[in-house]
Image: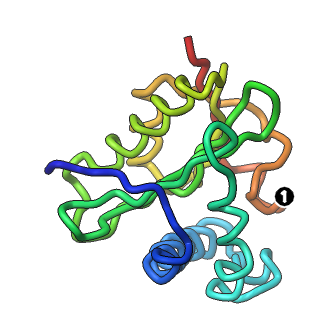
Amino acid sequence: MDVQFEPVDLGRHRDVLTRFNVAYLNWVAAGVEERFALSLAGLLGATIPAYVDSALDKLCEGTPPEGAFYLALDGNTAIGMGGLRQVSEGVAEIKRIYVSEAARGGGVGAKVLDRLVQDARAFGYRELVLDTGPFMTSAHRLYEAAGFFDIPPYPGAEVPEALHHDWRFMRCLLR
């Protein structure tokens, strides 16, 4: 599959980004409910759609080098998303890599991650951080293969503190 990347324009892409983020967080919510017997909406203090609506502008804010957020496209069809944002001097955070159900299994997630790592290098970051749920095993393999390793929770992580004890926080040193 030939994946193309389009920088997000919230004026044009808000609907698809909302749909992808709600789908992503509903999946996270199911994993949190099963693994922790907790409600993600309760931890976030809002329903998933309301949280996405309130967080989308912040998630997609910033222009290179402070941040970048992309839609992954197959032709004119959005099949995934992902972004990065600066969290401190020399450090960027990978955010919301998501691939639509119809496009999973074709390496799209790896292509999104590769694009974000390339951008981080081009923007001059020394390291990347991310968080990933304990049930996101396919993502774990992808991140480990890209050189990410486990670290303690980092400042600014979006994950509610009640989940930190069993969540994976990871770092990749860019050379």
* Secondary structure of the residue carrying numbered label 1: helix
Q: Is residue 51 left or right of residue 1?
A: right
Q: Position of residue 18 (x, y in %)?
A: 53, 79
Examine the rendering and report whether any part of residue 166 can be seen: yes
Q: Is residue 173 above or below residue 148?
A: above
Instruction: Depth check: give the residue in front, 27 or 58.
Output: 58
Q: Quadrant of residue 28?
A: bottom right
The one nearer the camera, 11 or 18, is: 11
Q: Position of residue 105 (x, y in %)?
A: 22, 54
> Residue at position x 55%, y 11% from top?
175
Task: Please give the residue where the numbered disc 1 appears in the rendered image.
Answer: 161
Please state if 9 lies on the left or on the right of 112 as rendered. right
Q: Is residue 27 visible?
A: no
Q: Is residue 154 above or below residue 25?
A: above
Q: Kindly identify the residue that appears in the image at 69 percent across and 70 percent down.
A: 57
The crowd level at tag 1 (other Cα within 10 Å; few <14, some 14-19, many 20+) is few
- The amino acid type found where label 1 is placed reads Glu
